[in-house]
Image: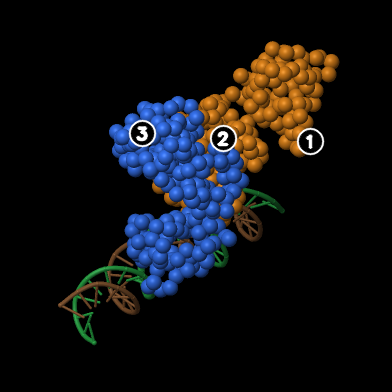
Chain colours: A blue, B orange, C brown, D green
DNA sequence: ATATACTTTTAGATTAGCCTAAAAAATGTA
DNA sequence: TACATTTTTTAGGCTAATCTAAAAGTATAT
């Protein structure tokens, strides 16, 4: 496929995200709102993108992304998320500071750069927000997220996200040494209050209240 | 200063490089040639850049870069060279593979990103081609390059470039463990053939023929 | 010093990406 | 069903960055 311009990539990414969440055609207005542009501009761009076969559309009936378009969008998303991992893991940014920079970096064109970066970062599967990183073929590991408190003793999993994203909670997690990407193994669950004993990164064990476990989202490992 | 567009940054960078090498006004044709565009396009852009005070120009008499323009250009160059160090040192690219990618990366806007990157790379002073990296204020460490064979016993220096850039020579250097960035200390110079004993990175000593030393460019350390 | 050659600028188009205003189509409702 | 509202498209314009062709200015060389 030919490469798209920066603007085209941003439209395609928006369409991908919207169609992933809604599962049906994406409306002109929805795209305009997401990109804070005007519906008229969206109509123009839709025509261009459909000429390039990354979407299909029927006038007045919204847009569908093609397989080719999906693959392209997932590659941009892959780059975005890998750069986010780089910024957090290597350059010590906080996970909530990296989005804007990654929005720029995701448009750098060089497959070799991205495969080297992937290797340098040790092939991460999730970005700092806990979102999965597609592989080179646009395949997302689709392990479902579960709430930690719903799992039973003996389960191993990976912390990928928090429900409560308030400062207080995040500071607490920081203090006890839990963050996105931490590997957890549940060694004990206490029936009477739902609290649990977990081992973090095969190193330190800790006790976690049910209230905390309710707010931790994990995938099986 | 306001930020420039990608095209404006590329014009300004070209003008900086041309005026650094020629020391007088830069001609429209020279800029057009360097950027492989047409003189007519250059005339347009020159007007715009001079309105933005990064260059001055008099019709039909070429362009001069202003202090402000120089600072802006040096910041772009700083970013380019830091990214090159990243690509070579961290992602294991060869020094001759990184230019195109750095051309894209140099336009990412984020001062914090660059200062973090600088720190992550341990504040390098030269890029993989041996060119100096300007600091945040656009100051270039201006240590002059010298030919290794011209130096005397006891001198410490940093290998920054090669005169001969042929594959044969570069392979040879690779084999004996010399590359850009290697710290050298001359421990002995043999009068009769100009060969010398050098210590590389405070580790391994080796003998270097005059012919090799003639092709190694260094700065004092 | 003046004709010729070269350089630079201007004039006028083109394309990408965006806009506003108005027309057309779809949708919701009495 | 017919009217009103909302959504979407079209028409026409704007700016940035480029181009070609032609005009204007500078330099050279006999």
Residue drawn 78% across the image and 22% down it: B208
**How many other residues sit within 10 Å of disc 1, few (<14), some (14-19) or many (≥20)?**
few
Q: Which chain contains the residue that carries disc 3?
A: A
Q: Position of residue C15 (x, y in %)?
A: 50, 65
Residue drawn 80% across the image and 14% down it: B190
Q: Position of residue A155 (x, y in %)?
A: 46, 39
Q: Are marks 1 and 2 in contact (CB under 8 Å)?
A: no
* As drawn, A4 above or below A25: above
Towards the viewer: A16 or D22:
A16
> Do the residues at discs 1 and 2 belong to one chain?
yes
Q: Residue furthest front?
A: A191
Q: How many marks?
A: 3
* As drawn, D16 above or below B205: below
Location of mark 2 (residue): B86
Residue drawn 68% across the image and 27% down it: B217
Q: Which chain contains the residue that carries disc 2?
A: B
Location of mark 3 (residue): A190
Q: Quadrant of residue B84?
A: top right
Location of mark 1 (residue): B168
**How many other residues sit within 10 Å of disc 3, few (<14), some (14-19) or many (≥20)?**
few
**How many other residues sit within 10 Å of disc 2, few (<14), some (14-19) or many (≥20)?**
many
The C terminus of chain B: image quadrant: top right
Return the mark for residue A173.
Answer: none
Towards the viewer: B26 or A126:
A126
Q: Secondary structure at mark 2?
A: helix
Q: Position of residue B189 (x, y in %)?
A: 77, 14
Q: Secondary structure at mark 3?
A: loop
């Amino acid at each position: 496929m030919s490469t798209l311009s920066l603007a085209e990539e941003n439209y395609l990414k928006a369409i991908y995200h919207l169609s992933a969440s809604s599962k049906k055609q994406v409306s002109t207005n929805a795209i305009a709102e997401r990109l804070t542009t005007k519906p008229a501009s969206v109509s123009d761009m839709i025509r261009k993108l459909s000429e390039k076969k990354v979407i299909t559309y029927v006038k007045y009936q919204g847009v569908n992304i093609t397989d080719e378009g999906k693959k392209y969008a997932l590659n941009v998303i892959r780059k975005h998320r890998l750069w986010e991992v780089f910024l957090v893991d290597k350059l010590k940014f906080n996970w909530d500071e990296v989005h804007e920079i990654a929005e720029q970096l995701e448009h750098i064109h060089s497959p070799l750069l991205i495969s080297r970066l992937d290797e340098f970062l040790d092939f991460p599967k999730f970005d700092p927000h806990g979102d999965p990183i597609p592989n080179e073929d646009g395949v997302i590991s689709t392990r479902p997220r579960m709430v930690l408190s719903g799992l039973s003793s003996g389960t191993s999993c990976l912390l990928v996200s928090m429900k409560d994203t308030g400062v207080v909670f995040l500071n607490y997690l920081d203090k006890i040494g839990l963050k996105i990407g931490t590997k957890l193994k549940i060694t004990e669950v206490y029936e009477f209050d739902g609290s649990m004993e977990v081992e973090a990164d095969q190193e330190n064990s800790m006790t976690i209240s049910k209230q905390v476990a309710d707010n931790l989202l994990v995938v099986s490992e």
